[in-house]
Image (cartoon, helix red, strand yellow):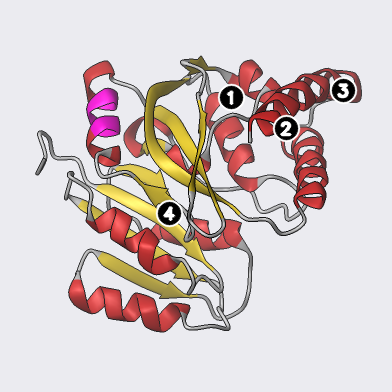
Amino acid sequence: MESSSEAVVSIITPSYNSAKFITETIRSVKEQTFTNWEMIIVDDCSLDNTVNIVKKAMMDDFRIKLIELKKNSGPAIARNRAIAYAKGNYLAFLDSDDLWLPRKLERQLMFMEKNNFAFTYSDYRIMSEEGERTDVVLRVPVKMDYKSLLKNTMIGTLTVMLDKRKVGRVQMPLHRDCSEDYGLWLTILSRGISAYGLNEELAVYRKCEVSLSSNKLKSARKTWNTYRKIENINIPSALWYFANYSLHAFLKHSKT
């Protein structure tokens, strides 16, 4: 699919010590049936061979761009640098260890243009750190508004696509103890926009096994801090949303 419109998709990819996985991630983008894209990789001072791998990929495909941060700053700043650089009218997000299926951009762009949606996401599969795809596919809600997102963090960042012309200013909040991507989705939906789920498996999330229990606690803490520090939700309401989040998170993790 070359393009049925003037759409250009800017792919936002932060990287840090991603040499083990980033070649496969880049390949999954190059295999997209929709070809009018740019992949903006922002490297956050990797200590491994990530930058050299990306530079080699750039020599083979002009659509791949590299920005090197001068100091280690975290994924939110890396993503914001890519967003500021992006030339496309659509933004899509893909971390440096995850994968897209070949028709991801084509199907999602068609879904958005047909329905005039500003914000979409999709189902995705879980794979192991070694790249073995599991039988677990996370099925997402067909629609989410601001309040439903506060109760359920089911939107996978690797599946999100935004129409910049409709969602307004896009920038991840810079709170290291909060969930930056979740904070951005909430900011967008707080403007009265709804997000719509495409119930097709279009991406593959790599589930790394580094201290899964501590990651769950860290995720819960970041969610709570997002309620209180970014959304400024009072404690009783935050407790209500957090209880719902905890239930959904338990159900999600019980599947994976």
The first of marks 2 and 3 along the sequence is: 2
Q: On the rendered structure, is 130 left or right of 167?
A: right
Q: Which residue is disc 4 drawn over?
A: 83
Instruction: Name the residue that disc number 3 marks.
Output: 239
| Magenta-drawn stretch, dominant element (helix, strand or loop) | helix
Residue at 65 percent of width and 17 percent of height: 147
Q: Which stretch did the figure color magenta?
A: 107-112
CB under 8 Å between callouts 3 and 1? no
Mark 1 is surrounded, within 10 Å at the Cα level, by few (under 14), some (14 to 19) or many (20 or more) other residues, namely some
**Which amino acid, mark 4?**
Ile
Is residue 124 found inside the magenta-colored segment of the image? Answer: no
Mark 2 and mark 4 in contact (Cβ < 8 Å)?
no
Give the residue at x 59% y 29%: 154
Q: Are marks 3 and 4 in contact (CB under 8 Å)?
A: no
The residues bearing labels 1 and 4 have C-alpha atoms spaced at a distance of: 20 Å
**Closer to the N terminus: mark 3 or mark 1?**
1
User: Which residue is painted at 55% across and 72% down in the image?
Assistant: 44
Residue type at numbered disc 3: Leu
Give the Cα distance between marks 3 and 4.
Answer: 33 Å
Label at residue 190: 1
Q: Residues within 10 Å of mark 2 (few under 14, many from 20)?
A: some
At 60% from the left and 20% from the top, the residue drawn is: 146
The residues bearing labels 3 and 1 have C-alpha atoms spaced at a distance of 19 Å
- First in sequence: mark 4 vs mark 2: 4
Q: Which mark is residue 231?
A: 2
